[in-house]
Amino acid sequence: MKARVAVHREFRVGTIDERLYSAFIEHMGRAINGGIYDPGHPEADERGFRRDVLALVRDLKIPAIRYPGGNFVSAYNWEDGIGPKDRRPVRLDLAWRCKETNQVGINDFAHWASMAGIEMMLAVNLGSRGLEEARNFLEYVNFPGGTAWSDLRRSHGVSEPYGVKMWCLGNEMDGPWQIGHKVATEYGRLADETAKAFKAFDRNIETVVCGSSNDKMATYPEWEREVLEECYENVDYISMHKYFGNNSKDTLNYFAKVEETGRYIQTVGAIIDYVKAKKRAKNDVRISFDEWNVWYHDRDVDSRRIKEWDWPEAPPLLEESYNFEDALFVACLLNEFIRRSDRVRIACIAQLVNVIAPIRAEKDGPAWRQTIYYPYQMASLYGRGDALQVSVDAPRYDCRVAADVPYLDAAAVHDQQGGMVTLFLVNRHLTESAALDVSLTGFLQPQLDRHIAMGGHALTDTNGADHQDKVAPSPGSGVGIEDGRLRGSLPPLSYHVLRVKVS
Ligand code: AHR
């Protein structure tokens, strides 16, 4: 098939907020305990954090990380995780029906995040608790000293405040499963008052209000409208969450869930605009897509296990094994975030280690990269700069979730400082190569600097502790510059990162 792509130096979507490549990690399963933190592991440092896991995290160049939940946060007492470890209580985690030992709390996590070079994005409990505990937490985390909560932090050995800027006002509060679930107006009022208090503390703080848990919720999209009507002026972002899978064993339909996500983003964007106009508001609210990933391989099995188990401590949970098909899907989804980066400013892969994660940390064994690690890494490393509008002229297909889906999925980013245009391309065709022809209008002397590719795998191929690099990127071939255009052939079911030097 022929696949013509056109980009133009002047036709920009906007400057990408680097937080588009953020992550999320929750106190659940073996994400924190048994993931980033495992004092008994040979790779553990003096504070119990695994060096090998940290190295894989660092290689992702993650700008921000959302913590500590997730459903977990809605019944979490942040005070349980501070002070001497031997005096921290063990509590029941009602979200995942486990025991939480609290051996990692805010100061421990902040230490890990600073080692990883990642900014924290903290969520407060607006489920079982409320404004009072949230404001105390803020004071503990962000006030320099001389008050009860800030001095308590100092007594815990942290003299400098963390200066956390991004705060999530609860988690998935529309979900009936959430501890402390609320109806929209009730939650909207609480979010408004909490955001108001946070901004009274520091007007530079950014607040994220909960949108729907996904676009299949019965209350979506009314939830967004009702919540925003209560709190629009005091919030900076509204959250979106969505998990994906090839449940119907139909690869093209799976890939097209990216288009469905585009509609979801568009709808939430339209609601933001509607409420802004209705309220005659001056501020803009953007989107924080702070939970996204593939989650379906073992989802039902895990749901059953949770119901049956007897409050275990850090059990393996949601440890999805990702295949090559999932990597291609993740590549397309990241392309969609780039294409819609005018609306979506923050996005967090959910989660980071072990639990639906790009990194697996084996108990007593190695840490390794899942297939989805790579497209996430490529986007994070090379997807910074200005997102360009991309026109794709390629054959299209119809499927259950979308119509008119181009077989070639494309995004382009111009790094002006580095003099580089990066194209992220996925040939989603099951059997045909794409004869690629890219025009780069306004860019002078284009030279192909690097071609990284993933392809030639069965869709079901996975990585594992004993075959860690089975699915991994390698230098690409078959694409070059001819007459100032990028031309070449992209095999079916393959992913390409084309780095083009321009002046
Ligand atoms: O990431 C796993 C769970 O998915 C989170 O705890 C929750 O917010 C979402 O439903």
Image (cartoon, rainbow, N blue to C red):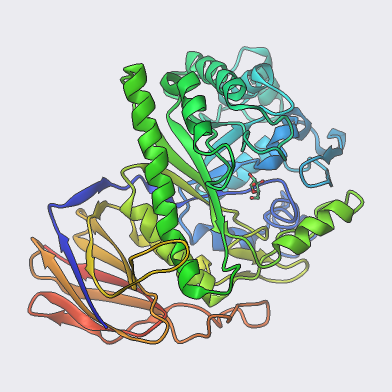
Q: Nearer the viewer, residue 415 or 289?
A: 289
In this figure, what is the number of numbered marks?
0
Apparent side of residue 55 relative to residue 402 in the rendered image (left or right): right
Q: Nearer the viewer, residue 141 or 302?
A: 302
Where is residue 29 shown, x and y percent of the image? 75, 54
Report if residue 19 is visible in the image: no
Position of residue 248 relative to residue 87, above or below, is: below
Where is residue 351 shown, x and y percent of the image? 60, 54
Apparent side of residue 49 relative to residue 457 in the rendered image (left or right): right
Q: Say which quadrant the N terminus sits in.
A: bottom left
Where is residue 303 shown, x and y percent of the image? 77, 56
Q: Residue at x 48, y 52 (%)?
A: 62
Q: Residue at x 67, y 21 (%)?
A: 130
Report if residue 465 is visible in the image: yes
Position of residue 390 relative to residue 374, above or below, is: above
Where is residue 182 shown, x and y percent of the image? 66, 27
